[in-house]
């Protein structure tokens, strides 16, 4: 870990947690104005806001994971791979923030904790070797894909903007998993997958409320 990489990682953490994100790409179906919102009942608006808060937490964690895995590897090509994925996920962070703003919902109050936990997991995965680190990406993205599918089933049908965000995020998570698989990822053991799923369940349950 070179000093310049450590500084870049710290900068990425501060930007993720404390600087309003700005997307570099448009999301199909998402209005440019963050104040735009669908005509939803109060109950639907609360539920949509809670679900998008969970998705926003997922993107905070994605920034932490890819940043820490980039920090841990000495492979220049893999370092670039992780940073490129983080850049794409940064758009997801911005899109989910935009939906939170439109729905009158707030991000999770525990985002610094979620970021720190995900960063630590990414460092551990990175230290276990390149193929394991990539395998961690594959399993993470597979679980995120399933999680986003469940949100597509739960989001109010009238909230077309949030549904558009989730659908585009889901397609790109699938692509990230495929890219990691093609780069040489190994399949993680079943107990590790189960632990990852359990940790994700805790995070999504808490973030839905806090």
Image (cartoon, grey):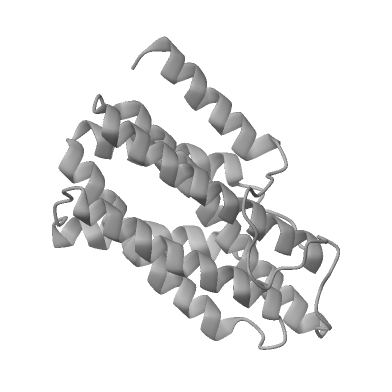
**For residue 150, side relative to residue 71 (left or right):** right
Of residues 66 and 164, the one nearer the viewer is: 164
**For residue 96, side relative to residue 89 (left or right):** right
Residue at the spot x=50%, y=63% of the render? Answer: 204
The spot of residue 58 in percent (x, y) is 51, 56
Query: Can residue 104 be spotted in the picture?
Result: no
Query: What is the quadrant of residue 124 in the picture?
Result: top left
Query: Can residue 54 be spotted in the picture?
Result: yes
Q: Name the quadrant of the N terminus.
A: top left
Of residues 147 and 27, the one nearer the viewer is: 27
Q: Give the vertical position of 207 relative to 82 (above or below).
A: below
Residue at the spot x=36%, y=27% of the render? Answer: 71
**For residue 205, side relative to residue 133 (left or right):** right
The spot of residue 130 in percent (x, y) is 19, 38
* Mark count: 0
| Extreme residue in the bottom direction | 157
The spot of residue 65 in percent (x, y) is 41, 42
Q: Give the vertical position of 83 relative to 4 (above or below).
A: below
Of residues 59 and 194, the one nearer the viewer is: 59
The spot of residue 159 in percent (x, y) is 71, 81
């Amino acid at each position: 870990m070179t000093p310049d990489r450590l500084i870049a990682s710290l900068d990425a953490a501060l930007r993720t947690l404390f600087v309003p994100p700005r997307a570099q790409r448009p999301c199909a179906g998402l209005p440019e104005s963050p104040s735009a919102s669908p005509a939803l009942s109060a109950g639907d608006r609360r539920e949509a806001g809670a679900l998008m808060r969970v998705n926003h937490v997922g993107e905070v964690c994605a920034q932490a994971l890819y940043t820490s895995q980039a920090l841990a590897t000495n492979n220049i090509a893999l370092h670039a791979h992780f940073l490129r994925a983080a850049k794409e996920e940064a758009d997801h962070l911005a899109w989910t923030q935009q939906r939170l703003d439109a729905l009158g919902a707030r991000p999770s109050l525990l985002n610094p904790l979620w970021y720190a936990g995900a960063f630590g997991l990414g460092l551990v995965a990175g230290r276990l070797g390149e193929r394991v680190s990539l395998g961690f990406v594959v399993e993470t993205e597979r679980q995120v894909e399933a999680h986003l599918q469940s949100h597509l089933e739960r989001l109010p049908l009238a909230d077309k903007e949030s549904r558009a965000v989730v659908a585009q995020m889901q397609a790109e998570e699938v692509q990230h998993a495929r890219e990691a698989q093609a780069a040489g990822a190994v399949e993680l053991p079943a107990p590790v997958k189960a632990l990852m799923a359990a940790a994700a369940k805790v995070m999504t349950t808490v973030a839905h409320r806090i």
